[in-house]
Image: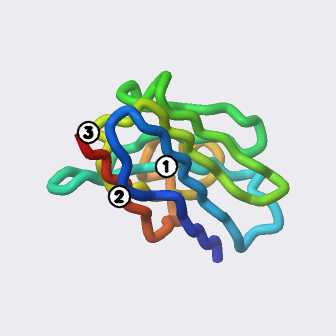
Amino acid sequence: QVQLVESGGGLVQAGDSLRLSCAASGRTTFSSYDLAWFRQAPGKERESVAAISWSAGRTYYVNSVKDRFTISRDSAKNTVYLQMVSLKAEDTAVYYCAAGRQGATLREAGYAYWGQGTQVTVST
């Protein structure tokens, strides 16, 4: 069973930076997986943010976070990161880490495993 544990959320001011981490376990290697970050703001549907192909390192971003967010992974630690800079109030949400078979990219339906989420709140 794949398990995902997010950390790094918190309360920051607009313009600040924050790095989220997602520790993955339950597989010897995640080379056949895509890992991704999704978020859900109050009263809104969950949306994709960024994804990474574990083996190739190919990355995918939703337009609203391009040039501000960077997804990366550390294969030795089985951890995926989301570096967020120039945070805006509209980035406030619960951020979820997810794992799915390679090729899932930004499609929520492609992800079978989910973490519990970590709250990010950006104040103005």
At 65% across and 64% down in the image, what residue appears?
Answer: 23
Horizontal placement of 39 versus 8: left or right? left
Amino acid carrying mark 1 in the image: Trp
Graded by Cα atoms within 10 Å as few (under 14), some (14 to 19) or many (20 or more), the crowding at tag 1 reads many
At 64% across and 71% down in the image, what residue appears?
Answer: 2
- N-terminal of the pair, mark 3 or mark 1, is 1
- The residue indicated by pointer 3 is 90
- N-terminal of the pair, mark 2 or mark 1, is 1
Question: Which residue sits furthest bottom?
Answer: 1
For the C terminus, the quadrant is top left
Mark whose residue sits in front, 2 or 1 = 2
Proximity of marks 2 and 1: CB atoms separated by less than 8 Å: no
Label 2 element class: strand
At 43% across and 40% down in the image, what residue appears?
Answer: 49
Quarter occupied by residue 86: top left
Visual colour scheme: rainbow
Amino acid carrying mark 2 in the image: Val
- The residue indicated by pointer 1 is 37
Mark 2–mark 1 Cα distance, whole angstroms, equals 10 Å
Graded by Cα atoms within 10 Å as few (under 14), some (14 to 19) or many (20 or more), the crowding at tag 2 reads some
Mark 3–mark 1 Cα distance, whole angstroms, equals 16 Å
For the N terminus, the quadrant is bottom right
Mark seen at residue 94? 2
At 75% across and 59% down in the image, what residue appears?
Answer: 78
